[in-house]
Amino acid sequence: MTLPPKEKLVVIVGPTAVGKTELSLELAEQFDGEIISGDSMQVYRGMDIGTAKATPEERARVPHHLIDIIDPDEEYSVALFQEAATRLITEINARGKLPFIVGGTGLYIESVTHRFRFAQAEQDPELRSRLQRLAETEGVEALHRRLAAIDPLTAERLHPNDVKRVIRALEIYELTGTKMSDFQHRAEHSPYDLLMIGLTMDRQVLYERINQRVDKMLEAGLVEEVRRLLDQGYGSALTSMQGLGYKELIPYLYGEITLEKAVNDIKQRTRHFAKRQLSWFRRMSEVQWFDLTDPAERPKIVQTIKQILAGKFHRLPNI
C-alpha cells in the first residue's frame, strides 16, 4: 500500500527583528506561496504597529493568514492556532501553492510542525481567581516561582508576565496532579514534508536592530495605538495587552512612568525575548540556520536558500 505524499511546508523562524518578513515575502512571491503568521500577537485586530504585522502593501503581494482574526479581548490559544494552521496548510497545498509559516512564537509553530497533542483539562474559575489575586498581591514572579517548583519545563518557556498561561499551567496541575509539560506530546518526526529555515545574526547587531525597530514603531504611532486600545476599553489585564510594546507603554499613559523609561523597558524586554526565541529554536534539530549579520552576504545566502527550496520541492522560482 502506497502512502499518500506528505503535505509540503516551509517554516521561517528566528528572533524578532532578524528579517523574517522580508525573506518570507521574497520566497513566497517567487515560489507561489501563501504565508501563515506564526506569531501569537498578530491575531489581534487593532494591534498593528507593536506586533510588526505585514503592511497592507506587503499583504497585497502575497496572501497572508491568521492576521486580524480576533479582537483584543477574545481568548486565543496554541490549540486554536494549531487547528487553524493545520487546516490552512492542507488548503494551501490543495490549491497547488506552497505554505509558509513565518514567525517567532516557538510553541505555536512547533505545535504544528510536530503535531502536539493537548490533553483537555477542566477549568476551575474559583482557583483561577485565587491565583490571579496571588499574582496581584505577591507579584507575577511569585506565581512563576510556584510553577517552577512543580513544572520547571513549562516555567522555563513561560515568561513571568504571561500570567494567563502561568495560571493555566498551575490550574492543570492542581486539577489533575499532572504537569502541563507532560500533557504536551510531541511527535518525534514531523508529519509534513518540512523545510525549516532559521535566521540569526550577531547578538549586538541584532540588539541594535531591535532598538532601531522600537524607535521606528514609536515614530509610526505606537503610543497612539496603545492609547486608542485603552480608550476602546481594552484593559491592561488582557493577554493581548501584555504584549511587548503595549504592556510597557500603559504605565506611561497612566502617568506612572516617563516615556523614556517606557521605551527603555520595551527595548530591554524585547532583547530578552529575542534571546528566549533563539534558545527555543536552537533545540529544534530540523532547523537549517543562516547568519545574516553581514548585509553584503545576504544576496548569496538568499540564493542558497532558494536553491535548497527548489531542490526539496522540485519547484522553479517565478522570476
Image (spheres, rainbow, N blue to C red):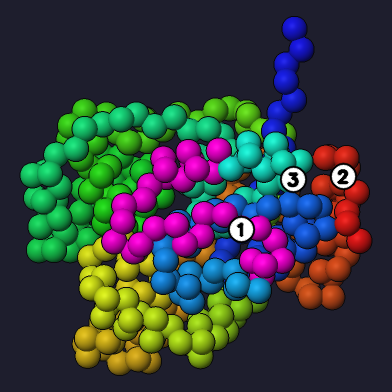
Indicate the position of residue 168 as horizontal and vertical percent values. 25, 44
Q: Is residue 155 above or below residue 26?
A: above
Left or right? Give the position of 210 relative to 141: right
Amino acid type of the residue tagged 3 in the rendering: Lys
Which labelled disc corresponds to residue 97?
Answer: 3
Helix, strand or loop at disc 1? strand
Which one is in front in this view, the residue at disc 1 or the one at disc 2?
A: 1
What residue did someone put label 1 on?
Answer: 64
Callouts 1 and 2 close, C-beta under 8 Å: no
Q: Is residue 13 above or below residue 170?
A: below
Asked if residue 259 can be seen in this view, the reply is: yes
Quadrant of the frame with the C terminus: bottom right
Span of residues in magenta: 58-87
Q: CA distance from mark 2 to mark 3?
A: 10 Å
What residue did someone put label 2 on?
Answer: 315
Q: CA distance from mark 1 to mark 2?
A: 21 Å
Helix, strand or loop at disc 3? loop
Amino acid type of the residue tagged 2 in the rendering: Arg
Left or right? Give the position of 48 relative to 29: left
Left or right? Give the position of 209 relative to 248: right
Of the numbered discs 1 and 2, the one sitting upstream in the chain is 1
